[in-house]
Amino acid sequence: MKRLSAMTAVTTLFFCSVQAWPQAANLPAAYAAAEASAVQAGKNLGLFQAVRRGDPAAVEKALDSGAQVDAWDGSFFPTPDGTPIEYNEYFCGPRSGQIEDILIKHGANLTRQDGYGQNVLTLASAVGCAPAVSVLVSNPVIKVHINDLAKAGTALDYATAPLERDKLARSPDATSLERLEYLSPESKAAQEKTAAILKASGAKSKSEFSPEDYAEAEAHFQKDYCPDTRSSR
């Protein structure tokens, strides 16, 4: 009887294994999908890093290279998740307005609600990111007196309430640097500037709402705003 060569034996064993375990035939496709996912994750990470650094040119380059404008980062601290536009607002810097404009130009979602019910305008208002708010109020998608999902308040309510980062800075988990940065007079001045921009754009607080305002806000909310089920908040 003719003996099989080592290569023939290995090949025969491989095909027998594939027949015994059909899923093995899909391994090349699975590896390719995993590799593509890793490449995309790397591009998205580059976008988040560029936003965090406040570098408009790097943000533009990352998006042009294939980063997803509404990519999701579950490690967003101190809140557990976020998109690039939310990063830009929370980690507000001198060029946040320019970065906000770039992200919007590339199709950033402006009507997404997070698990706390905040949209991009209420988030930017809450942290006193005046450059981002200035860009947002000029966008026709944004309604300056839309409530958040939980109907706790409008953007103006958030801007005139105690600064979100002020509360975070006073928490037991805050670092010395966060306390120094977030409790600074500059942060409070930024909040006042944010409120002024909103008022100039016709924003109202909930206490100023007429029945017509409530009806308009509710209709706009039902039409355009919906919670994002990815959020764990």
Image (cartoon, rainbow, N blue to C red):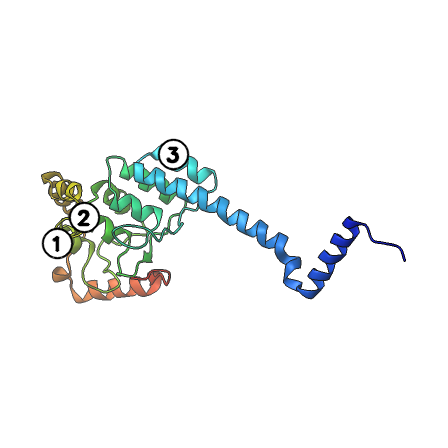
**Residue at (90%, 58%) from the top-left corner?**
1
Where's residue 21, x and y in %?
66, 64
Q: Quadrant of residue 223?
A: bottom left
Q: Are marks 2 and 3 in contact (CB under 8 Å)?
A: no
Q: Earlier in the sequence, mark 1 or mark 3?
A: 3
Q: Residue furthest left?
A: 185
Residue type at mark 1 is Ala
Left or right placement of residue 143 versus residue 107 in this view: left
Residue type at mark 2 is Leu
Residue type at mark 3 is Ala
Q: Which mark is residue 161?
A: 1
Q: Earlier in the sequence, mark 2 or mark 1?
A: 1
Q: Which residue is mark 3?
A: 58
* Quadrant position of the C terminus in the picture: bottom left
Q: Earlier in the sequence, mark 2 or mark 3?
A: 3
Where's residue 52, x and y in %?
31, 40
- Residue 217, compared with residue 140, is above or below; it is below
Q: Compare residues 233 and 57 and report the one nearer the observer.
A: 233
Is there any visible trace of residue 16 in the rendered image? yes
**How busy is the neighbourhood of tag 2: few (under 14 within 10 Å), some, or many (20 plus)?**
many
Q: Which residue is mark 2?
A: 198
Where's residue 69, x and y in %?
40, 46
